[in-house]
Amino acid sequence: MQTETVFRALADPTRLRILRLLGSMELAVGEVAQVLAQSQPRVSRHIGILCDAGLAERRREGSWTFVRGGDMGSATPLLCHGVSRLLADAEAEDEGFAQLCEADRRKLAEIRSHREAEAQAYFAQHAHDWDELRRLHSSDEAIETALAGALGEAPLGRLLDIGTGTGRMAELFAGRAEHIVALDKSLAMLRVARAKLQHLPANRVELVQGDFGSLPFAPASFDTVLFHQVLHFAQAPAAALSEAARVTRAGGRIAIVDFAAHQREELRDRHAHARLGFADNQMEGLLGDAGFDAEPPAALEDGELAVKIWIARRRGEDRKVAS
């Protein structure tokens, strides 16, 4: 019985502390062990029990295993939310438990600071390359403003940010989306994004390692799919857009921010660009073949490289986006 399994999982003070931690942010198993000052194998056993009860979820990311609260994907979300509220009430009324949780949160702050320091070191290492590319096109602020305008005021529902990079798009649209999944193939970039997004509610943003050529999601999982300066890395953009269409619900939208067609061949070697931008008719054809109806694109042309924003809607029955 699921209820009995849940209450058995709660019958240990360490597991209660772990659940309070996961209410704040997603953590690597090693980070949980660091906060609790316990061995990683012991903490892994506790996490396994919580996962078996549906109170937590694990996933691999390279050689690391991350764990998060299980309410979003649980078969019993109301029960999970009830446990979360119960633990909050327990902390408010049980002084001993409250002291343990407060000490854990102080250690959690150290982990946040360490993540930020690692992200800053990564930025410093790659700053020259990024700055070189930025000088060729409109400012990030102008592009973000144009993208927000192109998407309009409608809620974004469940948003998939493909190739999240630093997590900036997920951060930008966090207030407009019901839930955001930030996906990237690079473990290094996911760690940068995790540091950037760790101030957001743990149940609103999910970071996932994956490739745009084979998205690890069920069909029709998202209301909005975003490619921000990502599609030019695709050797087969048609395949990437086909995958995006598969996970977009009927009536949902795709937003692509990328370069207009250009002739800067050096970007292939210096920045690993597989495509030198996209012409409007080319993009319209790619979107149409994938099952999208494209709107007229927006253009930012105040740099050496023009930036285009293409918005398209998935064909099929149009349903209201959840708000």
Image (cartoon, rainbow, N blue to C red):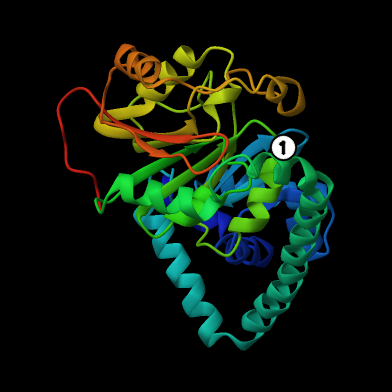
Amino acid type, label 1: Leu
* Residue at horizontal 17 percent and vertical 42 percent from the top: 320
Q: Is residue 200 visible?
A: yes
Where is 88 relative to 112, above or below? below
Count numbered badges in the picture. 1
Where is 231 relative to 12, above or below? above
Give 285 or 304, whichever is nearer the viewer.
Answer: 304
x%, y% of residue 136?
A: 62, 39
Q: Is residue 284 left or right of residue 277?
A: left
* Residue at horizontal 65 percent and vertical 76 percent from the top: 101
Q: Is residue 318 left or right of residue 253?
A: left
x%, y% of residue 80?
A: 43, 56
Where is 265 relative to 135, above or below? above
- Where disc 1 sits, the SS reads helix
* Residue at horizontal 67 percent and vertical 56 percent from the top: 195
**Rendering quarter of residue 250:** top left
x%, y% of residue 291?
A: 29, 17
Give 233 or 158, whichever is nearer the viewer.
Answer: 233
x%, y% of residue 188?
A: 74, 40
Q: Quadrant of the N terminus?
A: top left
Residue at the spot of label 1: 187
Give 192 or 142, whichever is nearer the viewer.
Answer: 142
Give 50 or 290, whichever is nearer the viewer.
Answer: 290
